[in-house]
C-alpha cells in the first residue's frame, strides 16, 4: 500500500443531501480511495487516498463526470469556494424574484379568472419561462442523474412539475377527451410554477444559512496576512505570502501580524499570542525566540527567519483542524445519510402507489385527484432538511467555539459533550478576564501625593505590556493627572527611570 494522503476539497454545484450522497458514492468507487465523506452543510469532500494510485485531478474528473465540480488547487481554494457560493446565491436570488413575479399573476388567473377567455393558454405561456429559465436547473440536474441511474431532489421537483404541466397542456388542447367521459378538465400550471418558486426560495434561504456558518473559518483565515515583507539582499520587498520559503528573512513592524512561524534573528519586541495560547499578556521576544504566524507584534520591530510557511504554520494547521472538524460527521448524521441514499426511490414508489390507489378505488373520474395526489407526494418529500440540519448545527457550534479559542476535535467529540456533567479546567496560573488589571499598590517607601502623577506620566511612555493597566487604573479609576517629566529612560528587562523636579525615580514591573 502506498502513502495515504488525506485532503479536503470544496465541492461545487450540490443542491441537496442526495447530491452529497451521490458525490460520496462516486469518490468511494475510485481505485485507491481509502475513505471519503461529503458534508452538504460545508460543501466539502474529505478523502483519504493512496497517492500512487490516485491524484486530486483524477478525483475531480470523476466528480465532474457525475455532474458536480471540485476545487483541487491549494492556493486560494476557500476564496474560490466563497466566490462560487456568492455567484450561486446571486443566481438563486434572481431566479426566485423572476419565478414569483410570474407566479403571482398565475395564482390570480387560476383562482379568480379561471373561466376567462384564453385563461389556460395565458397560464401556459406564463409557466414556460419559469420552467425553462428560472427552474431549468432542476430539469438539467435530474437528467444528469437519470443518465447515471441515480436520483436526487432535482428528480422529485422535475417529475412533479413536469407531470402537472404536461397534464395541464393535454387538458388545454384536448378538453373534449374529458367532456366525452362526463368530466371537466382542469389545469394545474400554477402548481408547477408555485412549486418551483417555493423550492427556489427554500434553496435561497439554505444557501444563506450555509454562507453564514462559515464565518468562523473566514475569521480565522483573516488572521493570516496576505503579504509579507521579505528581506532579500539587504532590501525589503513586499511579496505574496504564498511566495515565502523556509529560510527567508521577514521584517515585522510594530502593530503588524506575523506572516510565518520563525525565529527572531534581529530586534526585540512584545508579541500578543492570545489567539494561539489564550494568555492575555504579550510575550517578550528576543533574538532566538520563536514566533507564530497570525500573532501580533506590539511595538518593536524585528527580523525573523521563516521555519514554517504556508500550510505548515501552526495557524494553518489550526484552520485545517477546524475545517476537518466542521466537515466530520456525527454518528446521527451517518444514519441520516443512509436514509437520504434511498429516500428518492422510496418517494417515487409511494407516489406511483398513491396514483394507482386513487384510480383503483375511485375510477377514471378521479384521475385529476390521482395526478395531484402523486404530485403532492413528490413535492413535499424533500430530504434537504434531513441532510442540512445536523451538519449545519455542528458546523456553527464548532466554528463558534474556534472563535473563542476552543478547538473541538471532531463532530463525535461534540456530540459526546451532551454526556458531560463536570468540566475541569487545567491552566497555568489562573483563569483571567483576558486583560491585566491593577488590584493594589505597594510602595517601597512612604507614598507621597505626587508619586502617582509621576507614575502615570512614566507608564504613558512605557512599552511594557502592564503599562496600559496602570494607566487605565490611574486615569479612569483615580482621576490622576500626569506630571511633566524632565527625563524618561526605558531600561530593557529592568523597568523605567525618570527625572522630576531634580529627583530620580525607578519603577520595576513585577507581575504575579
Image (tube, helix red, strand yellow):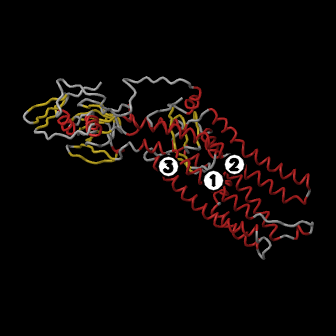
Q: On screen, 445 above or below 156?
A: above
Query: Which of the two marks, 3 or 1, is nearer to us in this view?
Result: 1
In three-dimensional space, the C-alpha distance between marks 1 and 2, rounded to whole angstroms, equals: 11 Å
> Is 56 in front, or is 36?
36
Task: Quadrant for the N terminus, please.
Answer: top right
Q: Position of residue 217 (x, y in %)?
A: 46, 42
Q: Quadrant of the C terminus?
A: top left
Q: Which residue is mark 3?
A: 81
Sort mark 2 into few (<14), some (14-19) or many (20+) by Cα contacts within 10 Å. many
Which residue is under mark 1? Answer: 202
Instruction: Look at the numbered discs 1 and 2 and tell me whether their residues touch, using CB distance below 8 Å.
Output: yes
* Real-space CA distance between mark 3 and mark 2, rounded to the nearest whole angstrom: 25 Å
Q: Earlier in the sequence, mark 3 or mark 1?
A: 3
The residue mark sitting in front, 3 or 2, is 2
The residue sitting at the left extreme is 502
Residue 84 placement (x, y as % from top left): 51, 53
| 107 left or right of 204 in image | right
In the rendering, which numbered label is found on residue 382? Answer: 2
Q: Position of residue 189 (x, y in %)?
A: 74, 65
Residue under the point 83% across and 48% down: 353
Residue under the point 63% across and 48% down: 16
Apparent side of residue 248 relative to residue 320 in the rendered image (left or right): left
Secondary structure beneath dot 1 equals helix
Q: Nearer the viewer, residue 81 or 383?
A: 383
Amino acid at each position: 500500500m502506498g502513502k495515504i494522503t488525506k485532503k479536503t476539497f470544496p465541492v461545487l454545484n450540490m443542491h441537496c443531501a442526495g447530491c452529497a450522497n451521490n458525490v460520496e458514492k462516486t469518490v468511494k468507487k475510485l481505485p485507491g480511495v481509502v475513505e471519503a465523506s461529503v458534508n452538504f452543510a460545508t460543501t466539502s469532500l474529505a478523502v483519504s487516498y493512496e497517492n500512487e494510485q490516485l491524484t486530486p485531478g483524477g478525483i475531480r474528473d470523476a466528480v465532474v463526470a457525475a455532474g458536480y465540480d471540485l476545487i483541487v488547487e491549494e492556493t486560494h481554494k476557500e476564496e474560490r469556494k466563497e466566490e462560487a457560493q456568492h455567484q450561486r446565491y446571486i443566481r438563486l436570488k434572481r431566479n426566485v424574484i423572476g419565478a414569483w413575479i410570474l407566479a403571482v399573476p398565475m395564482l390570480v388567473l387560476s383562482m379568480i379568472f379561471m373561466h376567462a377567455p384564453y385563461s389556460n393558454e395565458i397560464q401556459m405561456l406564463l409557466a414556460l419561462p419559469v420552467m425553462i429559465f428560472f427552474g431549468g436547473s432542476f430539469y438539467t440536474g435530474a437528467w444528469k442523474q437519470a443518465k447515471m441511474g441515480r436520483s436526487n431532489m432535482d428528480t422529485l421537483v422535475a417529475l412533479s412539475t413536469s407531470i402537472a404541466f404536461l397534464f395541464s397542456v393535454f387538458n388545454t388542447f384536448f378538453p373534449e377527451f374529458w367532456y366525452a367521459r362526463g368530466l371537466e378538465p382542469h389545469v394545474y400550471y400554477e402548481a408547477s410554477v408555485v412549486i418551483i418558486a417555493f423550492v427556489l426560495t427554500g434553496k435561497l434561504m439554505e444557501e444563506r444559512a450555509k454562507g453564514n456558518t462559515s464565518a468562523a473559518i473566514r475569521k480565522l483565515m483573516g488572521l493570516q496576512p496576505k503579504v509579507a515583507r521579505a528581506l532579500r539582499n539587504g532590501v525589503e520587498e513586499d511579496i505574496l505570502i504564498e511566495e515565502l520559503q523556509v529560510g527567508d528573512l521577514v521584517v515585522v513592524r510594530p502593530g503588524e501580524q506575523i506572516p510565518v512561524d520563525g525565529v527572531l534573528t534581529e530586534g526585540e519586541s512584545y508579541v500578543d499570542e492570545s489567539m494561539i495560547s489564550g494568555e492575555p499578556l504579550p510575550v517578550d521576544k528576543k533574538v532566538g525566540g520563536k514566533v507564530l504566524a497570525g500573532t501580533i507584534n506590539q511595538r518593536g520591530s524585528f527580523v525573523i527567519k521563516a521555519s514554517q510557511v504556508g500550510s505548515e504554520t501552526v495557524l494553518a494547521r489550526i484552520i485545517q483542524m477546524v475545517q476537518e472538524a466542521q466537515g466530520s460527521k456525527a454518528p446521527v448524521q451517518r444514519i441520516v445519510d443512509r436514509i437520504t441514499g434511498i429516500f428518492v426511490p422510496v418517494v417515487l414508489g409511494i407516489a406511483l402507489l398513491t396514483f394507482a390507489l386513487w384510480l383503483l378505488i375511485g375510477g377514471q373520474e378521479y384521475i385529476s385527484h390521482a395526478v395531484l395526489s402523486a404530485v403532492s407526494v413528490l413535492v413535499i418529500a424533500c430530504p434537504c432538511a434531513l441532510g442540512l440540519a445536523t451538519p449545519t448545527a455542528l458546523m456553527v457550534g464548532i466554528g463558534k467555539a474556534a472563535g473563542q479559542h476552543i478547538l473541538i476535535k471532531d463532530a463525535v467529540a461534540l456530540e459526546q459533550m451532551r454526556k458531560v456533567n463536570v468540566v475541569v479546567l487545567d491552566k497555568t496560573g489562573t483563569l483571567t478576564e483576558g486583560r491585566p488589571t491593577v488590584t493594589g499598590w505597594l510602595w517601597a517607601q512612604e507614598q507621597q501625593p505626587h508619586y502617582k502623577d509621576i507614575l502615570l506620566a512614566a507608564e504613558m511612555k512605557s512599552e511594557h505590556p502592564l503599562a496600559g493597566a496602570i494607566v487605565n487604573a490611574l486615569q479612569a479609576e483615580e482621576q490622576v493627572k500626569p506630571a511633566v517629566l524632565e527625563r524618561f529612560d526605558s531600561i530593557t528587562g529592568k523597568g523605567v527611570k525618570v527625572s522630576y523636579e531634580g529627583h530620580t525615580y525607578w519603577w520595576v514591573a513585577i507581575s504575579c
